[in-house]
Amino acid sequence: MTTDPQNPGTRGDLIKSLEHRYSPGEVRRRSQRRLVNGTGWLVWITLLSGLKRVLDVVIALVLLTLAALPAAALWLYAKSRGGGISKSVRLGRWAAPFDLYHFSCRSGLDDTALAKLPVLWNLLRGDLALIGPRAATPETNPVERLAWKRYQVRPGLICLWWIRRRANIAYATEAQVDAEYIDTQSLRGDLGIALRAIPAAFYGEGVSEAPDIIHLAGIPIHNLSMDEAVEYIADPARQDPVQICFVNADCVNIAARNAAYKQLLQQSDLVLGDGIGIKLAGKILNTHLRQNVNGTDLFPRLCARLDGTAEGIYLLGGKPGVPEDVAAWIGRNHPGVKISGTQHGYFAKEETAGVLQAIHDSGAHVLLIAFGAPKQELFIRDHLRETGVKVAIGVGGLFDFYSGRIPRAPAWLREMGGEWLYRFIQEPRRMWRRYFVGNVIFLYRVFQFRAALRRQESQNIGGA
Ligand code: UDP
């Protein structure tokens, strides 16, 4: 009889399998295998980091060659103004300090990308890698210094955190994003980050001031971060019910045609800017939108926040079976969240009273409604009090994502601000108008709005 060491049948089999497992020959074979595996892994890591370094050197050489003439011209210009190349200290790999070079022109040029050309020299020398965490300064506060993980690798010219901040989707801390980068590092990943940096460079950081409300073509957008929005919704002490709306570029277009919807947005308790279109509008209007607080990214964070609390969620909308599948997603991922109830969104008008009563009886704290904009927002406006909930939010296509009906764009595309492109590819017939016509109209509206603002400003100055 043969003995399966993983599944010994009788006591005798068990003893035999243990004897075999711990026999000198078997123990030696196992330790040899461990050594080979461990060495293989080390060789692999060394090759990978070696290759990364070789690529960095090649890229630095190519860029230095291309930039040689402009750099020389800039250096002469800097010299003529009493400047030159200046250095500032940064912390490199293993937190070893190094000098970061840049041009000091003593003019407006100092803040431009051109003045940073000498960092290519740092790249060539190996102080910096092309991709890596941001190089910390020696003054970095002690708490951040404790995020020691970043020092395991060379700091980079381009970092993942920077890209996410520019696409307004940096919901995690810098240390968390650095750790994510280091743990999942690969050459392919680095190539992806380098490519994603190109559109990110155009999105811009916005200006430093961040007003609490951004007015966009007559729609007030509340400038909250993701965490602040989640706290606002989950607040168990809330007394009066509130309506929350997400506004993306398409919603701004709808509001321009639909006066009732526009007025509702103006009167809502909280309007959150959703998507890269709103971020771009902020840039055009020279105001800074803190984060892309969209429903799809907010939802799992809200579930995590409500996990283990008494505040339940009611899911209303989507095709029959869809809200139930969303509830199943919550059950799998946040089992401590109370699901107060579910109801699909294709009930007859006469059934509305019954649906509202069921929501009321469920005692839910949060009501998520997916009927699409503006139907869901108008429904909340008309029935918020009857539902008895504390917070009602129109969430559009969110249920379709979390029920698994429609896959969501991969993270790398979202980082490039390209989620809309993915939606278009999935449903080209329904979405082409929204994105290709709608986005152009939206941008036109934003520019028109900016022109009106400027006219008003100059009139005010003239009148003053
Ligand atoms: N829906 C619904 N009842 C309706 C119309 C739509 O429940 O009478 C659902 C539909 O099944 C889908 C969601 O509402 O799940 C709307 O998704 P859409 O992507 O159109 O919303 P958007 O994000 O564009 O506002």
Image (cartoon, rainbow, N blue to C red):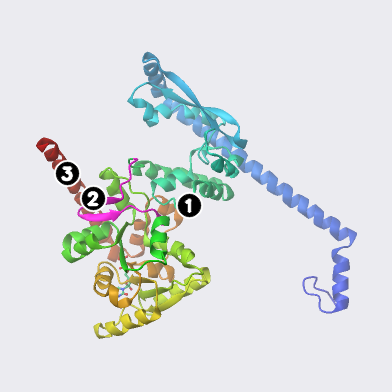
- Give the amino acid at mark 1: Ala
- Earlier along the polypeptide chain: callout 3 or callout 1? 1
- Give the magenta-colored segment's residue range: 208-226
- Earlier along the polypeptide chain: callout 3 or callout 2? 2
- Give the amino acid at mark 2: Leu
> Relative to residue 464, is residue 99 depicted above or below?
above
> Relative to residue 84, is residue 60 depicted above or below?
below
**Image disc number at residue 327:** none
Whether residues under marks 1 and 2 lie with C-beta atoms below 8 angstroms apart, the answer is: no
The quadrant in which residue 352 appears is bottom left
**Quadrant location of the C terminus in the rendered image:** top left
**Quadrant location of the N terminus in the rendered image:** bottom right
Q: Which residue does the numbered mark 2 point to in the structure image?
A: 443
> Relative to residue 334, is residue 84 depicted above or below?
above
Q: Which residue does the numbered mark 3 point to in the structure image?
A: 451
Label 2 SS? helix
Residue drawn at x 37%, y 30% is 112
* In this picture, residue 31 sits left or right of residue 371: right
Ligand 1 quadrant assignment: bottom left
Question: Dot 1: few (<14), some (14–19), or many (≥20) neighbours within 10 Å?
Answer: few
- Earlier along the polypeptide chain: callout 1 or callout 2? 1
The quadrant in which residue 54 appears is top right
Q: Which residue does the numbered mark 1 point to in the structure image?
A: 172
Q: Position of residue 394 (x, y in %)?
A: 32, 67
Question: Dot 2: few (<14), some (14–19), or many (≥20) neighbours within 10 Å?
Answer: some
